[in-house]
């Protein structure tokens, strides 16, 4: 169950986000400690804490003041170490609130291997990462077997 700080978000969207994360997290029990933040974000402001396999988290904002507010709400809460605002620039300026260990690199990256590394960092299950990578590779006309993708995910999660 999401512990609600104060919500500005449509309950149906919160329920959808909760169900989506429950289906892809390696540790869905982290959702029991998730926080619905009282901020206006570019997505449902559901902050999921770090865990055994989840090294960090992130939310995106188009308003820097709201991003700073999110950092204040996460500060000193168990499971949300080192909350910080990161400025990002693509076609427009936006801000990310991140907590936990920094991701291995910024952005999604062009290679599916980048997506796999980020999926591992954010604590997604091996199956969820494999399914995402398979869809991406197929859309690029690259036919990796699910076994090959899963092996790559395992290598990323458990480097030797």
Image: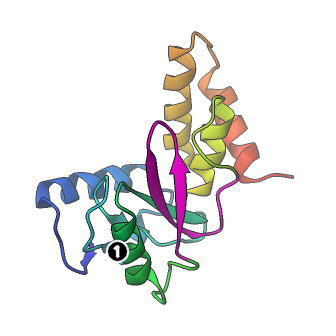
Q: Mark 1: few, some, or many residues within 10 Å (few <14, many ≥20)?
A: few
Q: Measuring 38% from the left and 74% from the top, which residue is drawn there?
A: 70
The correct choice, above or below, for 29 with respect to 11 in the image is below
Q: Quadrant of residue 22?
A: bottom left
Q: Quadrant of the N terminus?
A: bottom left
Q: Measuring 53% from the left and 58% from the top, which residue is drawn there?
A: 87
* Farthest-out residue, right: 160
Q: Is residue 100 magenta?
A: yes
Label 1 sits on residue: 32
* Farthest-out residue, bottom: 76
- Secondary structure beneath label 1: helix
* Farthest-out residue, top: 141
Percent across and percent down for residue 61 are: 37, 57
How many labels were placed on the picture? 1
The correct choice, above or below, for 104 with respect to 40 in the image is above
97 and 53: which is toward the camera: 97
Q: Measuring 70% from the left and 45% from the top, which residue is drawn there?
A: 154
Residue 124: in sight, yes or no? no
62 and 17: which is toward the camera: 62
> Which residues lie in the magenta part?
83-104
Percent across and percent down for residue 60 are: 41, 56
Percent across and percent down for residue 131 are: 50, 33
Q: Measuring 57% from the left and 45% from the top, which residue is drawn there?
A: 126
Q: Main secondary structure of the magenta part?
A: strand
The correct choice, above or below, for 155 with respect to 77 in the image is above
Q: Is residue 96 magenta?
A: yes
Residue 9: in sight, yes or no? yes
94 vs 2, left or right, is right
């Amino acid at each position: 169950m999401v512990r609600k700080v104060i919500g500005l978000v449509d309950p149906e969207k919160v329920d959808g986000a909760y169900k989506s994360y429950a289906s892809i997290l390696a540790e869905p029990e982290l959702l029991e400690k998730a926080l619905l933040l009282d901020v206006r974000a570019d997505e449902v402001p559901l902050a999921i804490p770090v865990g055994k396999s989840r090294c960090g988290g992130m939310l995106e904002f188009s308003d820097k003041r709201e991003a700073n507010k999110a950092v204040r709400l996460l500060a000193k809460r168990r499971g949300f170490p080192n909350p910080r605002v990161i400025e990002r620039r693509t076609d427009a300026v936006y801000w990310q609130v991140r907590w936990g260990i920094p991701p291995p690199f910024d952005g999604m990256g062009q290679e599916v291997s980048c997506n796999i590394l980020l999926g591992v960092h954010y604590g997604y299950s091996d199956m969820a990462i494999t399914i995402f990578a398979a869809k991406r590779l197929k859309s690029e006309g690259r036919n990796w077997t699910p076994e090959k993708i899963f092996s790559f995910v395992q290598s990323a999660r458990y480097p030797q």
